[in-house]
Image: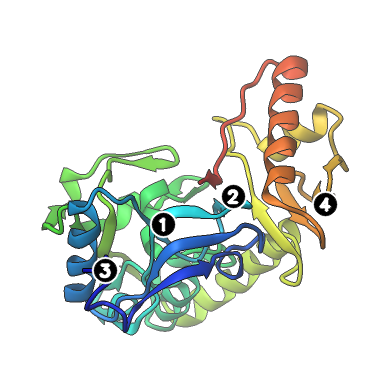
Amino acid sequence: MSLISGFEHFVRENEPLSPLTSLRLGGAAEYFAEPTSVDELVAIVKRFSEEGVSVRLIGAGSNVLVPKDGVKGLVINLSAPAFCQIEIDGTKMRVGGGARLSHVVSNAVREGLNGPQHLVGMPGTIGGALHSNVNFPNVDIGTWVRSVDVMKRTGERLTYRGEEVAFSSHQSSFGDLVILAVEVEFEKESPESLTKQMQKLWIVSKAKRPPADLNAAYVFRDPSGESAGDLIESAGLKGSSVGGVSLFDANPNYMVASDGADAGDVVKLIDMVTNQVNEKLGVKLETAIQIW
C-alpha cells in the first residue's frame, strides 16, 4: 500500500515549496498535505509518524528557509478554513492555528479588542507567533493566552490552560507539532481609537520592512535590549551580499533574495554576519529563521 493511499485528495508528491516562503527559495517537499479537517490532519500525521517519516509544518513561510534540494518527508500546510476560523465572544477570541496575523488584527480592531493592533504588519500565522512568542515593547503574545488546543505527533489532541504554558523572550514551551487553536482575551477599547493606533503602528512597521514586492525574510533575533539590525550595521556589514542575497539597506536584519539566488546564498550570508558581529562586537546572534 502506498504511503498516501486514501489521502490522495489532499496529499501531493514533489510539491514545490518556494511559493510558500517569503524568500521564494528552495526545492520541493517529498510529500505535501493540505488537510481540510482536523480528522484528516490527525489521520495523515499518525500514518506518517507510524511509518517513521518526518513531519513538518509550514505556515505563512515568513521564517522558513527551504534547501535548494528540497526536504524529505511530509510538509503540512493548514490553510484550509477549518484551521483559520476566528470567533469573538465579548473580550475573548478563539483563533485557528492557521489564521493569518493580519486577519487577527483586523477582526480585533473592528470588535474593539485592545492588543492585537501591535501586531499590524507582522507576517505569519497565530500558530507560528505562539511557537516563537512574538513580542513587542512591554507586551508579548503569551500574556493574552487563556487556552491552547494542540496535536502531538502521535495524533493525540490536548488542551493546555494558559498557566500551563511557559512563555519567555521569543519562545514558548510548545514542543507539539501543531497548534490547532488558541483562546485569547483582551481588554475592550473603542474601535475608533484602536484604528488610529493601528494606522500609526502600520506606518512605523512599514518603514522598517522591505516592500511587499521584494522576496525578503527577517533573519536574526534581537538580543536582549539590543537591535540585531543596529548591531549588523555597527559591524560595518550594511549592504553586504552573497550571490543573489543581500542585506536590506533600511534594516539589515532582513535579507532580500533576487533572481538567481538560492538557499545556499542565504546560509553563507547568515554565517558571515554571525561571525563578523561576534568578532567585532562580541555578540553571538541567533537566527529567527528556521533552516530546514
Q: How far apart are the alpha carbons under marks 1 and 4?
A: 27 Å
Q: Nearer the viewer, mark 2 or mark 3?
A: 3
To which quarter of the image does residue 240 belong? top right
Q: Secondary structure at mark 4?
A: loop
Amino acid type shown at disc 3: Ser
Earlier sequence position, callout 3 versus callout 1: 3
Q: Nearer the viewer, mark 2 or mark 1?
A: 2
Of residues 286 and 241, the one nearer the viewer is 241
What residue is pinned by disc 2?
67
Instruction: Name the mark on residue 2.
Output: 3
Q: How far apart are the alpha carbons under marks 2 and 3?
A: 26 Å
What residue is pinned by disc 1?
128
Q: Nearer the viewer, mark 3 or mark 1?
A: 3
| Residue 105 % position (x, y) | 46, 73
Left or right: 192, with 252 as reference point: left
Proximity of marks 3 and 4: CB atoms separated by less than 8 Å: no
Q: Residue at x 26, y 77 (%)?
A: 7
Task: Look at the picture and state if 147 lies above or below 176.
Answer: below
Coloration mode: rainbow
| Residue 189 % position (x, y) | 39, 73
Amino acid type shown at disc 1: Gly
Residue 153 visible in the picture: no
Q: Secondary structure at mark 2?
A: loop
Q: Nearer the viewer, mark 3 or mark 4?
A: 3
